Amino acid sequence: MKAERIVLAQHPTGMPGHDDLRLEHFKLPSPGAGEVSLRTIYLSLDPYMRGRMSPAKSYAAGVKIGDSITAECVSEVIESNHPAFMPGDIVLGRSNWQTHSVLAGAELRKLDPALAPVSTALGVLGMPGFTAYVGLKVHGTPTPGETVAVSAAAGAVGQIVGQLAKLWGCRAVGIAGGPDKCSLVTDTFGFDACVDYKAKDFSDSLARACPDGIDVYFDNVAGDVLMAILPLMNEFGRIPVCGVIAYYNLEKLQREGPDFSPLIMRSILTRKLRVHGFINYDHMECMDDFLNEIPPLVRNGAIKYVEDVVQGFDNTVEAFQGLLTGKYTGKVLVQVADDPTK
Amino acid sequence: MKAERIVLAQHPTGMPGHDDLRLEHFKLPSPGAGEVSLRTIYLSLDPYMRGRMSPAKSYAAGVKIGDSITAECVSEVIESNHPAFMPGDIVLGRSNWQTHSVLAGAELRKLDPALAPVSTALGVLGMPGFTAYVGLKVHGTPTPGETVAVSAAAGAVGQIVGQLAKLWGCRAVGIAGGPDKCSLVTDTFGFDACVDYKAKDFSDSLARACPDGIDVYFDNVAGDVLMAILPLMNEFGRIPVCGVIAYYNLEKLQREGPDFSPLIMRSILTRKLRVHGFINYDHMECMDDFLNEIPPLVRNGAIKYVEDVVQGFDNTVEAFQGLLTGKYTGKVLVQVADDPTK
C-alpha cells in the first residue's frame, strides 16, 4: 500500500522547515504475526518533538537522520493479525509522522467512541492531560488557597493545569499570548485571571493578577516569562518544569545576555524554591488515579478542553511551526484522514 | 564598659569595604533582668552575611543602616543576671560584629570545653555542620554508590558535606580554588577527588573526576562552576542550593551575558533534576539527629575539620572580604579575645 511519511533530513538549526523535515513516499508492508496495519486519523503534535530533532541529550535518544518523527496517533485498523483488533476499530498507538503504519497489536489501546471523542485520547484524556495531572499533583503539590500560575495556559497541558488547580481549591492564573487566548483561558477554562505575555505591561499585570504571590508555577516555556515569575514566587514555592519552549529553537544552551542565572539561582536560594524537571512517563504509577478521576470530570463538563485540528498530512510541518510560535489554541492535532466516528 | 562594633554605614555595591562597614565605639549597657553581658571570643564569618547587607529580599530582613551585622559568637560571661550562667562561663549566642554584648540568658547555650574546642560550636558542631547535614540528607537524599559533588569544598560547609557523603557510602568529589585547598580536600578530608576551578582544564578535569556522572551537587557558589556541573548531572539528580557566592557582590540579579538560563532550565527539564533552595533553620526538626550522630564522629576523628582563625576584631572587614574571595581555608572565625579554655 502506498503511504507517506515525514522524515528528519537534517538536524534543524532554529525553526524546523521543509529542508529539515522531508515528506517521502514509502510502501507500507503487510502486517506480520501479531501486527496490525493502520490508517492514521489524528496525529499529535507536541512541543517536546522539537527536542527530539536536536542532537543534544534530552529525555530520550533523538530521532535519527532518515527516520520519521515519533508521535502518538489515533488510527483506524485496516488489517489485523492480532485477535484483539478488527478492521474499523479505532486505536491509540505510538507511531510516527506518517499516513499509515504497521504496529504490534500488543502496543495498541482500543478506543470506545461512545465514551469520548476519539481525538481526546491525544489530549485531555491522553498524555497532555496526564502530564498536567502528574506535574501539578506530584511536583506542584498545591494546597487549597494557594496560587497556581501556568504558562502556555491555552495549550494542551496548560488548560488542564489551571482547571485542576481550581478543582483542587487554588487560585489559577494563566499566562498566554494575546487577548483571544487570554479570554479563552478565563471564560472557557474558568481560570481566575490570565495575563498576556505579549503585552507591554506584562510584569505589572502579572503582579496584579497574583496579589498573594505565586506558590506553584507550572512552567511550560521558561525564558522571559520565568524571569517575570521568579520575583513573585513565595517562600517554599514549587516550579514543576514541563517544557522550555522559549529555548527549543536555540542552537546552543546559551544565548545573548544579560545572564539571568543570578536571578534564577538567587530566587531558588532565598525563597527556598523546589524546581523539578519531570516527564509524564516516569510517573506511570499515577495513571490509574488519572483514569479514575479525570474522564468523569470531562464527561460531566467540569473539565473543558479545546483542540485545534489542522487538516491534511501535507500541512504537518507548517502546523508544527505554528505550534512552536503559539499560533494555535489548545491541543494541536493534524487530521490525516476522515474520522469515521464523527 | 567601652566596646566596639561594626555597623552598616551604607549598602555595599560589589565587595563591601570600610566605607560600608564602619567601626564605632559604644558603651555597653549593664545587663537587665535575665540578661548576661559577654566578651566575644570568636566571631563567625559566613557568606550569607553578604546577602544581609543588601537591600534585596533574602531569607530574612536585611541589616538596617546603622545596625551592626548579626553573627553567631562564642563568648565569655562577664556579668550574669540569669541563674543558668556565671562569670567565666563560655556560651554560644546570636550577637553582632561587636567586641562585647548583652544578651538574654534564655537565648544562650552553655558550652562544655571538655567535649570539644569551643570554636567548633561555630563550625563543624554548629550551623555550618548542621547546614551540611540537612542539605545533604534532606535535599540531596544520597544513596550508596552515588557521586556527590560539592563546591567550596574546603569551606566550613563543603568540608563536612564530602565527609558525610563518604560516610554514607558515596563517591565524594570536591571543587575548590587552587592546589593547596584541593590537597587538603583529598588528603585531610578524604574526598575521592578534588578539582581546581581556577585551573584552565577545569571542565575536563571535573568530567574525569566524575566518570559515572553526578547524582548530587551540593551548590555553595552557583556561577561558572554550576554551568560546568550541569552537563554532568545524571537523570533524577538533586541540587541542594546552599549558597550563590558567585553572585553575592552583584548589584543586580542579572549580569553580562551570555545568558545561561537555557542551560539551567533545559538541564533541569531533560535530566529531570530536583533543585532545592534551603536554609538550615527551616529544618530544626533534624537538630536532634545531628547532635546524636555528628559530635561522636568528630570526637573519634571520623570527621575532620579545619578552621581559619583571623586574629583581632580590627581585621573583621578584611577577613570578610577574604572569605568572599576564597582567601581562607575552612571555617572562618575572627578571634576577638583570648580563648581562656586553651
Image (cartoon, coloured by chain):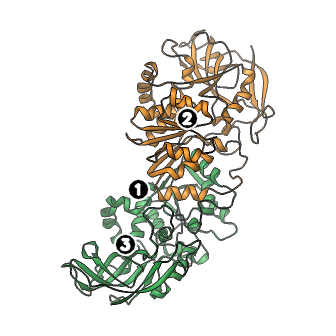
Chain colours: A green, B orange
Q: For the residue labelled by badge 3, is the local secondary structure a helix, a strand or a loop?
A: loop
Q: Which amino acid does label 3 sit on?
A: Leu
The image position of residue B152, as x and y in percent, is: 58, 36
| Left or right: residue B62 compared with residue A49 | right
Residue of label 2? B153
Q: What residue type is labelled 2?
A: Ala
Residue depicted at x 58% and y 69%: A249
The quarter of the picture where the N terminus of chain B appears is: top right
Quadrant in the rendering for residue A293: bottom left
Please rate how many residues cluster around mark 1, counting C-alpha atoms within 10 Å: few if below 14, some from 14 to 19, many from 20. few
Q: Residue B197 or B308: which is nearer the viewer?
A: B197
Please rate how many residues cluster around mark 3, counting C-alpha atoms within 10 Å: few if below 14, some from 14 to 19, many from 20. some
Chain-order first, disc 1 or disc 3: 3
- Which numbered marker is on residue A138? 1
Does any portion of residue A51 appear in the rendered image?
Answer: yes
Front tag of 1 and 2? 2
